[in-house]
Image (cartoon, rainbow, N blue to C red):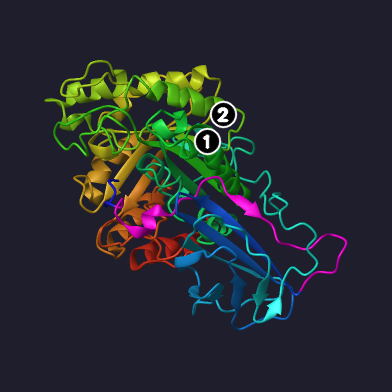
Amino acid sequence: MRHPPRHLSLWACAALAAATLVPLTGSASAAAPACSVEYSVTSQWDSGFQGAVKVTNNGAAKDSWSLSFDFADGQKVTQGWSARWSQSGTTVTAANESWNGALASGGSVSAGFIGSWSGANTVPRTFKLNGVTCNEDITDPTDPTDPTDPGDGTAPALKASGNKLVDATSGATRRILGVNRSGGEFMCVQGYGIFDGPVDDASVEAIADWNANAVRIPLNEECWLGLDNIKPEYGGADYRSAIKDLVTKVKAHGMTPILELHWSYGQYTGNSAGCSDVHATCQKPMPDAQYTPAFWSSVASAYKDDPQVAFDLFNEPYPDRATSTLDQAWACWRDGGTCPGIGYEVAGMQTLVDAVRTAGAGNLILIGGLAYSNDLRQWLAHRPTDPAGNLAAAYHVYNFNTCASESCWDEQLAPVAAQVPLVAGEIGENTCSHAFIDRVMKWFDDRELSYLGWTWNTWDCASGPSLISDYAGTPTAFGAGLRDHLQAIGS
């Protein structure tokens, strides 16, 4: 999916790098406090930062809540989510929204904000919930240990078996049903951070609460490799660590992480060009031979011992827009090299499969077709050779695509789905409604196929398909269709 422009939006400056959580919870030897607060600065830049709070109520159930704390260095809250944020002098207050006021005994609620700072950004030391001081038994408020580490997780290792996906351990048939979590492909290259909005445990749990069992995570190859044009704090080891942290959280909630290359290097200014930049600042028609094989070799090496993670080789190929014939386009898709109409050396899908397998990774691989992954007509004839036999076809469909009807799906998708697992990596519509994806989901459900909605981001659904209005999981009118359906059918 092509993104709506966001680099000028205020909230685009919200960056989620690898979260540095400052735990503010009681010691094991002390009595539990009336409430506990975990405060984290999840990203910080020259004059701003993104913060998050998680409040746990250890007392009686509450119908409403209000958290207050004081900044010590003149920081200012400029905007927030999942709470009604306000500030008077140094005192900040976060009061519940209408939809998250109930706080059970032992229950937790999370909220986030963007703030400004200058000189210092000291962590607040005292927090009050409904006027009652929290964390009174705290012994070391600067301990960097993260008490919310989600652990090893329970996500299955998926494997292609005939035209089905199965649990590699039990052999049970599985479907991928979930969402995309955009941000990792664009924030870093635009210089704002790593993620767009929070990716803490609460926000991942909100995805799981929709009964999703998979999260597709778009990536940027320049950021992963840490190339010179990327700010060091948003690229290389820091970027890879942030992705690993999100993968761990996704798995901990029993969901399959799908790592996908979304934006890549290579200058393309031909038909349907998304940008004229050589750098990975937009969707290119094909992967580049200079960096993409190295990207996938690195990703595969990092996750070769983790079969719970799946790989999606390239978001939306469109060499058919650059070349004069479909035969040329499909040859470019599989074999790469010098492709007509594309000015850089292309890495074909066979090269990328080889890069993954040579690195020793047997993980499930998804591969999209032509026309922004909307055309699979010659996918079977051109599919790469895979020594692991673990490939699935990836398909994207929106209401404005060419192949967006049951008759087209019957003609073009059904033959592919009869031979290999078929995953609709992106489904969506630009109507702020869900009538179209309802039809998509029915067609895929009838054939026990997989799909993921685009996208779990709080964008205006009028400018692009957005499933949620906040990261607590409140759906847009479009997102309600996916949420209600996933919760109805189970996973």
| Label placed on residue 240 | 1
Say which of 417 and 203 sits in front: 203
Q: Is residue 352 above or below residue 404?
A: above
Q: Nearer the viewer, residue 52 or 417?
A: 52
Percent from the top left, x then y, of residue 389? 48, 24
Residue under numbered circle 2 = 302
Q: Are marks 1 and 2 in contact (CB under 8 Å)?
A: yes
In this rendering, the answer to whether 171 lies above or below 455 is above
Indicate left or right for 346 with 327 as reference: right
Q: Which amino acid type corresponds to the residue marked 2 in the rendered image?
A: Ala
* Label 1 CA crowd tier, 10 Å (few <14, some 14–19, many 20+): many
- Residue that appears at 23% across and 37% down: 371
Q: Nearer the viewer, residue 433 or 466?
A: 466
Q: Which residues are magenta?
A: 6-33
Say whether residue 28 is magenta.
yes
Tell me the residue at 57%/59% (across/down): 202
Taking the view exactly as shown, the residue that stands out farthest to the front is 119
Q: Is residue 83 above or below residue 283?
A: below
